[in-house]
Image (cartoon, helix red, strand yellow):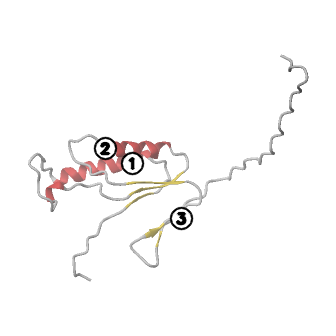
Amino acid sequence: MSPKPGRTKKPPKPKPPTKPIVEPEHEPEPRKPSPCAEYPQRMKLEVQNGVVLIGSDGHYVPNQRVPTGHRAFVKFAKTIPNLRACIYNGDAFDFSAISHFGRRMWDKQHLIARELEVVGKHMHEIELATKRGVPMYYTIAISKQAGAE
C-alpha cells in the first residue's frame, strides 16, 4: 500500500546500541553469615546478586491441610532461578497443647511429639525444594524471663 499523495513516510527511528550481555563465569557465592557486632544473636548475610526467600508463621498442626503460604513458599523455592538463600523466620510450631492461651472448646489437643514430626516434615519439604548449594537458615526463639539478666 502506497502513502497518500503529498505525504512521505517517516524513516524508522534508529535503535540505541545495546550492550552485550556478559554472563559471569560463575555465580557469586553468598558470604557465610557472620554475627553483627551490636547484636551477636543476629546474623548478617550479604548477597550481591540474587534473591533471598524468607517465609514464616506456618503454625503447622497435625491433621490439617498444608497452609497456602507453605505451598507458595515451596513453589517459589523450586522456581526462583537466582535463589541465594532460603530463610524460615519462625513460628512453624503452634504448640497449642502447651500454650499459655486457654484451650478453646473445639480445639483438639495434639501430642507435642506429633507436632514436632509434622513441622520437621514441612521443613524437609522446603529443603528438598531448594536447589543444591542454596543455604537454608532457621531462626530460633529464646525467651528471656522478666528481670533475668
Amino acid under label 2?
Pro
> For mark 2, what is the residue?
67
Identify the residue shown where x is 78% and y is 45%: 18
Q: Earlier in the sequence, mark 3 or mark 1?
A: 3
**Mark number displayed over residue 46:** 3
Amino acid under label 1?
Ile
> For mark 1, what is the residue?
126
Q: Give the crowd class for mark 1: few <14, some 14-19, many >=20 residues within 10 Å.
A: many
Q: Earlier in the sequence, mark 2 or mark 1?
A: 2
Mark in front: 2 vs 1: 2
Mark in front: 3 vs 1: 3
Identify the residue shown where x is 40% and y is 43%: 72
Q: Position of residue 129 (x, y in %)?
A: 43, 45
Furthest toward the left, the residue is 105
Q: Position of residue 121 (x, y in %)?
A: 30, 47
Query: Mark 3: which secondary structure?
Result: loop
Query: Mark 2: which secondary structure?
Result: loop
Amino acid under label 3?
Glu
Identify the residue shown where x is 88% and y is 25%: 7
Identify the residue shown where x is 33% and y is 59%: 90
Residue 39 location, quadrant: bottom left
Residue 115, compared with residue 6, is above or below; it is below
**What quarter of the picture does the N terminus occupy?**
top right
